Image: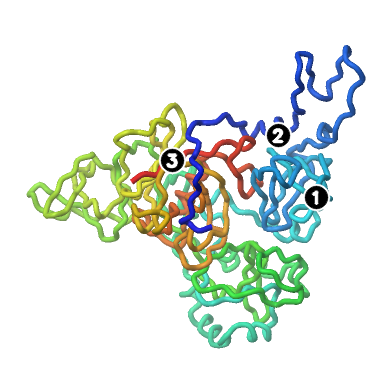
């Protein structure tokens, strides 16, 4: 969806009563209320009433899922979870291919679903036909066992395409590789010679120590970890070709690119595209291949490992106060103004947070803000998080809301009137322009509409002209506008997107874990609603 699209519907800023996710299954399992003062729940026999009515399949205890009960799994990239046992009902969320969740032992209905609708935890129904199955021996469920690691800012190993790369449908022979990859022999000679340089990694998002809430609790290491090729590209330590790629392809095609079963290649991936990886192994010609989340293959010689930025915001409950600043320009300096001159007083490291006093002054045409240590900082070198002069009316009690300033390029999480987290963001590159006509971020008050652990985003949404699969921690709040991680850049505190709110992977995960509705265990995405919970408020202003 294009980022400049905008819904005409106004957000509901009055909090609505919503069932907590944990209670939703109970609500779904209760029969409808009857009218009259002598009404009794269906299934309860009244001694003063006539003969009891037959119990419907939906009231059978065997339809109620248990945590330790049987499971249902997704065999397509998306398996919807419905509010009711009806494809026409609201979608509460979805499972990702290979993912499984607990279900009832028996289906509740077979209407428009030959395999039957099963209740799932913590709420909703999944149709065991087409997108999902109760057969835990299904090839997709046996093959795609790697799930996203929700404890990490980068939930999968990621890589960017450094040279136009084939998306192979099955393991290619050496002859087929030469056929489908132009100038392959020259490329492989260069790769063997420069592999160490080409595959070199930096310290990344997953190297920063975090607490349970996602706050950084220590500095990143000086050097990146020593990772094997298998670890870099999503493997489990074994370089053996897995059973489902031996002797051809043994699993169905779940990608959006449809090809006949005998195909060798599906398509090609443009340079700089981003991919999430779930396995890697050695193929013909002693060449390594990586498997993407849709079970296609890419030669790793044409990939560059991507590990995300180490930048992050600050936990406002740990002594920080507003205003504070985040350094977004490399080579920034602190200044001593005691002689009414810009005397350098030290370096201001890139990406660091600086506690401010709230005082500012102009000198030599530059506006400077005072740091708590008495030095001064150019406001052009930092993104400054400040408390609004007037908080919105809904900032009361423990109401969660997100404050985003386009002018300041900052994002602050609030609980009522209390800021709990602050960081630098990157909003639409056209600043305060018209979102309908320019790459500007929409302004107003909205609610989180749906959340995705990862999802492929349109290039117009992310402000990148290349395909980006499995963008982490995506939260849509209005049409194609979303808050999400942006592992492809490290430029927070400056406008640069096509309208979305770009955050570092660490910050995007921190925000994702804090907002409502929470993504239930095993689900890959959730939509706000009565059964799942109301979305957190998002307040965007100049």
Residue drawn at 35 percent across, 58 percent down: 430
Observer-side mark, 3 or 1, equals 3
Q: Which residue in the protein does label 1 denote?
A: 134
- The location of residue 537, given as percent across then percent down, is 47, 38
Q: Nearer the viewer, residue 309 or 119?
A: 119
Q: Nearer the viewer, residue 149 or 113?
A: 113
Where does residue 327 sit, x and y in percent of width and height? 30, 53
Q: Secondary structure at mark 2?
A: helix
Looking at the image, residue 419 sits to the left or right of residue 355; the answer is right
Label 1 to label 2: alpha-carbon separation: 20 Å
Q: Are marks 3 and 2 in contact (CB under 8 Å)?
A: no
- Determine whether the residue tagged by mark 1 lies in a helix, strand or loop: loop
Q: Which residue is mark 2?
A: 25
Residue located beneath label 3 in the image: 445
**SS of the residue under disc 3:** strand
Local crowd size for mark 3, using a 10 Å CA cut-off: few (<14), some (14–19), many (≥20)? many
The image quadrant that residue 239 belongs to is: bottom right
Image quadrant in which you'd find residue 47: top right
Separation of marks 3 and 1 at Cα, in angstroms: 42 Å
**Earlier sequence position, callout 3 versus callout 2:** 2
Residue 346: image quadrant is bottom left
Spatial distance from mark 3 to mark 2, Cα to Cα?
Answer: 31 Å
Residue that protrudes farthest toward the front in the picture: 8
């Amino acid at each position: 969806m294009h980022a400049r699209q905008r819904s005409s519907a106004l957000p509901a800023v009055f909090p609505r009563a919503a069932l907590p996710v944990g209670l939703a299954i109970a609500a779904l399992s209760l029969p409808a209320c009857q009218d009259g003062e002598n009404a009794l729940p269906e299934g309860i026999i009244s001694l003063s009433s006539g003969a009891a009515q037959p119990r419907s399949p939906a009231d059978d205890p065997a339809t109620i899922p248990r945590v330790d009960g049987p499971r249902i799994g997704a065999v397509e990239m998306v398996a919807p979870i419905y509010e009711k046992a009806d494809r026409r009902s609201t979608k509460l969320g979805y499972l990702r291919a290979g993912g499984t969740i607990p279900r009832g032992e028996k289906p509740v209905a077979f209407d428009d679903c030959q395999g039957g609708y099963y209740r799932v935890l913590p709420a909703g129904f999944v149709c065991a036909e087409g997108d999902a199955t109760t057969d835990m021996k299904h090839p997709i469920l046996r093959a795609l066992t790697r799930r996203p690691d929700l404890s990490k800012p980068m939930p999968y190993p990621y890589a960017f395409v450094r040279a136009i790369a084939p998306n192979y449908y099955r393991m290619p022979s050496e002859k087929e590789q030469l056929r489908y990859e132009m100038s392959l022999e020259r490329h492989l000679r260069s790769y063997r010679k420069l592999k160490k340089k080409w595959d070199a990694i930096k310290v990344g998002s997953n190297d920063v120590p975090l607490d349970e809430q996602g706050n950084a609790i220590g500095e990143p290491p000086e050097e990146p970890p020593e990772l094997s090729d298998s670890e870099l590209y999503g493997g489990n330590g074994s370089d053996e070709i897995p059973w489902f790629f031996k002797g051809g392809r043994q699993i169905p095609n779940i990608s959006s690119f449809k090809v006949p079963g005998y195909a060798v290649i599906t398509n090609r991936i443009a340079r700089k595209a981003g991919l999430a990886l779930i396995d890697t192994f050695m193929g013909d010609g002693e060449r390594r291949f990586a498997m993407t989340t849709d079970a296609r293959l890419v030669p790793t010689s044409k990939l560059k490992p991507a590990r995300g930025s180490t930048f992050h915001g600050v936990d406002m409950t740990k002594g920080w106060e507003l205003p504070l600043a985040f350094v977004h320009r490399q080579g920034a300096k602190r200044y001593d103004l005691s002689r009414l001159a810009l005397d350098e007083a030290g370096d201001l490291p890139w990406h660091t947070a600086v506690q401010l006093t709230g005082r500012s002054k102009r000198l030599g045409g530059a506006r400077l803000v005072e740091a708590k240590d008495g030095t001064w900082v150019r406001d052009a070198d930092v993104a400054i998080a400040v408390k609004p002069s007037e908080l919105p009316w809904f900032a009361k009690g423990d109401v969660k809301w997100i404050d985003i300033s386009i002018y300041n390029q900052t994002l602050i999480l609030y609980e009522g009137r209390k800021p709990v987290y602050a960081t630098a963001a990157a909003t639409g590159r056209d600043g305060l322009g018209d979102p309908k006509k320019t790459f500007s971020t929409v302004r107003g008050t909205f609610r989180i509409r749906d959340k995705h652990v990862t999802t492929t985003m349109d290039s117009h949404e992310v402000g990148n002209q290349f395909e980006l699969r499995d963008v982490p921690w995506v939260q849509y709040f209005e049409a194609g506008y979303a808050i999400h991680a942006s592992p492809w850049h490290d430029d927070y505190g400056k406008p640069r997107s096509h309208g979305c709110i770009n955050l570092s992977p660490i910050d995007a995960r921190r925000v994702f874990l804090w907002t409502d509705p929470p993504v239930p265990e095993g689900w890959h995405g959730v939509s706000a609603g009565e059964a799942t919970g109301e979305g957190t408020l998002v307040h965007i202003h100049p």
